[in-house]
Amino acid sequence: MSGPAVARTRAELAGLLAEHRAAGAPVVLVPTMGALHDGHASLMRSARESLGPVGSPAAGALVVSIFVNPLQFGAGEDLDRYPRTLEADLEICAAAGVDVVFAPSVEEVYPGGPPQVVVEPGPLGDVLEGRTRPGHYRGVLTVVAKLFGLVRPDVGVFGQKDYQQLVLIRRMSTDLCLGVEVVGGETRRDDDGLAMSSRNIYLDADERTRALVLSRALHAAQAAAADGAEAALAAAREELAAVDGVDLDYLALTLPDLTALPEGPVAPGTQARILIAAKVGTTRLIDNLPVVLGRSA
Ligand code: PAF
């Protein structure tokens, strides 16, 4: 199995994509911070399927970026200990049929230090994750805009696990006319229901067991949603109350675009999203699921 070509610089990246661009082939980008797991791999595999066989410039190019973006970490967060596992990541990329891995240094992405011009997420950047992590989505959108500028993909693929990030990136691409179609890939879960995350390796065995309550709470909400929004939230809270040592940050039920549900009863079949964030030990975990509110007649 031959591996992907690795570009460390903008110039190397441009060189590796030149043939694909000359052939007019589409480019798909899967941006990551590395420490890849099967959640990332499934995004890559479905991107590969959409592009056609690996290695032919006429087929599209699948690019994965691996960059731990300092701009999106707040003071006291895990920037320094964030897992960096490039060798293992390259093997995962090879198995998924990635053409090019772009793994730049911080200096390559931010020559001259943090950028003076950044992408502001607007009001949606101040709620949920953004409330607890001020500036986080400014950092995310700024680096994703840079990656879109460097890779110039037709399609950008992001996991739904950070659902707020997905909604914001889609909004950025539309609002700023970036011309990148933003696709959300389904969250992958371990057999016990825990959403796959690069941060799960921080959990010890006891914490991991406690962490399972997040997905249990979301699934309970999903199951109770036929009886309405209040019933869905109550079912999730009941699950959460049964487990100690889980420090809930938020449990929120919103419309799919993350705006508030209308007051009062909603029409049967209303699509919504339930989102949760909690700290288990020192590890902050997030998860979410789609829900359908109300009982169809
Ligand atoms: O989801 C991530 O891994 C990161 O937030 C992203 C989108 C790669 C930007 O650094």
Image: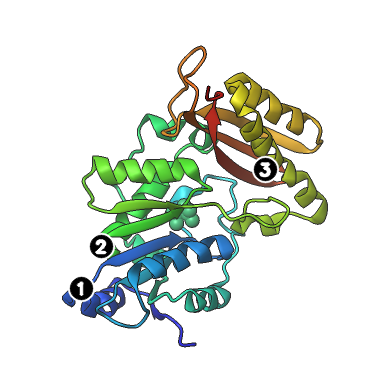
Secondary element at image label 3: helix
For marks 1 and 3 on the same chain, the one whose residue lies earlier in the sequence? 1
**Colouring used for the render:** rainbow
The residue shown at (41%, 32%) is 124
Q: Are marks 2 and 3 in contact (CB under 8 Å)?
A: no
Q: Is residue 275 left or right of residue 102?
A: right
CA gap between label 2 and label 3 equals: 36 Å
Q: Is residue 97 above or below residue 243?
A: below
Q: Is residue 71 above or below residue 18?
A: above
Mark 3 lies on residue: 215
Q: Residues within 10 Å of mark 3 (few under 14, many from 20)?
A: many
Mark 1 lies on residue: 21
Q: Is residue 202 above or below residue 130?
A: below
Residue type beneath disc 2 = Arg
CA gap between label 2 and label 1 equals: 10 Å
For marks 2 and 3 on the same chain, the one whose residue lies earlier in the sequence? 2
Residue type beneath disc 1 = Arg
Mark whose residue sits in front, 2 or 3: 3
Q: Are marks 2 and 1 in contact (CB under 8 Å)?
A: yes
The residue shown at (46%, 29%) is 255
Q: Residues within 10 Å of mark 2 (few under 14, many from 20)?
A: many
The residue lying toward the viewer, choosing from 241 and 53, is 53
Q: Residues within 10 Å of mark 1 (few under 14, many from 20)?
A: some
Secondary element at image label 2: loop
Secondary element at image label 1: helix
Mark yes or no: residue 119 visible: no
Q: Is residue 223 left or right of residue 92?
A: right
Mark whose residue sits in front, 1 or 3: 3
- Name the quadrant containing residue 220: top right
Mark 2 lies on residue: 152
- Name the quadrant containing residue 246: top right
